Image (cartoon, rainbow, N blue to C red):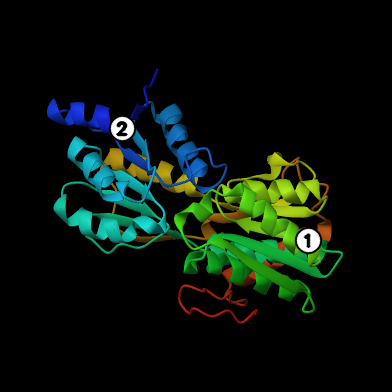
Amino acid sequence: MTILKTLTGASAALALSAGAVLAEPGLIIDLGGKFDKSFNESAYNGAQRWVEEMGGDYVETELANEAQREQTMRRMAERGANPVVVLGFANASTLEAVAPDYPDTDFVIVDSVVEQPNVKSIVFSEHEGSYLVGMMAAMASETGTVSFIGGMDVPLISKFACGYAQGAKAANPEIDVIVNMTGTTPTAWNDPVKGAELTRSQISQGSDVVYAAAGGTGIGVLQAAADADILSIGVDSNQNHLHPGEVLTSMVKRVDNAVYDAFVAGEAGELEPGVEVMGLENDGVSVAVDENNEELVTEDMMAAIDEARAQIAAGEIEVHDYLSDNSCPAF
């Protein structure tokens, strides 16, 4: 039996005072919690798979607020966790400052790039996966209007939105795409009530397919869409099961694989610094089709996304990366 060690204030202080040293990986869950049914939960599932398959233990903690970022990273490193995996772009500047103070600790950041000799950065081609689900949304729409709800209004989420709009317009040049962000602070990741309100507003404007890239807020989006009997698209984790027959698909982002692979490499002493990109070509992003949505996904949709996937891989279709150029040709 394995034991999950959770790093909290009191227990961490006790461990540090006792001089405890762990030879185990650490995972810092970002704001929104590990059961957000999206990004964080995917990471947690990857860690749990490592426990089940490798028989190891790991140290885990969940951030409750912004102020905890630096102290939590330092506490993990000082306790001996190695590697320390941190989730989310919001940790980048903190890790940039913390990593040099712990040169013997390997860090992994998921969703951003930190250029330090002891940091591995894992990023995803979210725009490519979003392009594919955008095509599916346009092909499924009966009103000629689809929509997108993002979490925090940051360039990374605009990367999702832009790819989605580009894919939708590739499938139907006349399609209208409505885009709303939930907010400008981290609370935007965990506000399902606001997500539902935005969804209803978009429905009133004609949207009959809505794509949520908003963490825990997306749960409200998918619920409001199901209540109104329109289609939704999940993100990060496969969310098709949340509303069977109502979720057109999910743009799966394999954060679970990123965490699992980091733990495996760390245990073997083979974790290399630098940047790893997970995209369509290595199944870092994909479109989820299963028993919960297979009746919604037509043969024409599958043929179109298979062709587009191959064309993207071959460089015949260039999906705009909003992070490299903060504009979107689809709008």
| Rendering coords of residue 310 (x, y %) | 64, 67
| Apparent side of residue 109 relative to residue 199 in the rendered image (left or right) | left
| Rendering coords of residue 151 (x, y %) | 55, 58
| Apparent side of residue 126 relative to residue 264 in the rendered image (left or right) | right
| Apparent side of residue 203 relative to residue 114 in the rendered image (left or right) | right
**Placement of 212 over or under 42, stated as above or below:** below
Which of disc 2 and disc 1 is earlier in sequence?
Answer: 2
| Apparent side of residue 224 relative to residue 317 in the rendered image (left or right) | right
Res 194 seen here:
yes
Residue at 31% from the left image edge and 46% from the top image edge? 68
Image quarter where the C terminus lies is: bottom right
Q: Amino acid at mark 2?
A: Thr
**Placement of 18 over or under 214, stated as above or below:** above
Q: Quadrant of residue 79?
A: top left
Mark 2: secondary structure: loop
Is disc 1 in contact with disc 2, using a CB cutoff of under 8 Å? no
Q: Amino acid at mark 1?
A: Ile
Residue at 74% from the left image edge and 42% from the top image edge? 243
Q: Residues within 10 Å of mark 2 (few under 14, many from 20)?
A: some
Q: In this figure, which residue is indicated by the disc labeled 2?
A: 8
Residue, far right = 142
Residue at 22% from the left image edge and 45% from the top image edge? 74
Q: Residues within 10 Å of mark 1 (few under 14, many from 20)?
A: many
Residue at 74% from the left image edge and 63% from the top image edge? 202
| Rendering coords of residue 45 (x, y %) | 49, 37
Mark 1: secondary structure: helix
Residue in front for this viewpoint, 45 or 62? 62
| Rendering coords of residue 236 (x, y %) | 56, 51
Q: CA distance from mark 1 to mark 2?
A: 43 Å
Q: In this figure, which residue is indicated by the disc labeled 1?
A: 203
Residue, far top = 1
**Placement of 266 over or under 13, stated as above or below:** below
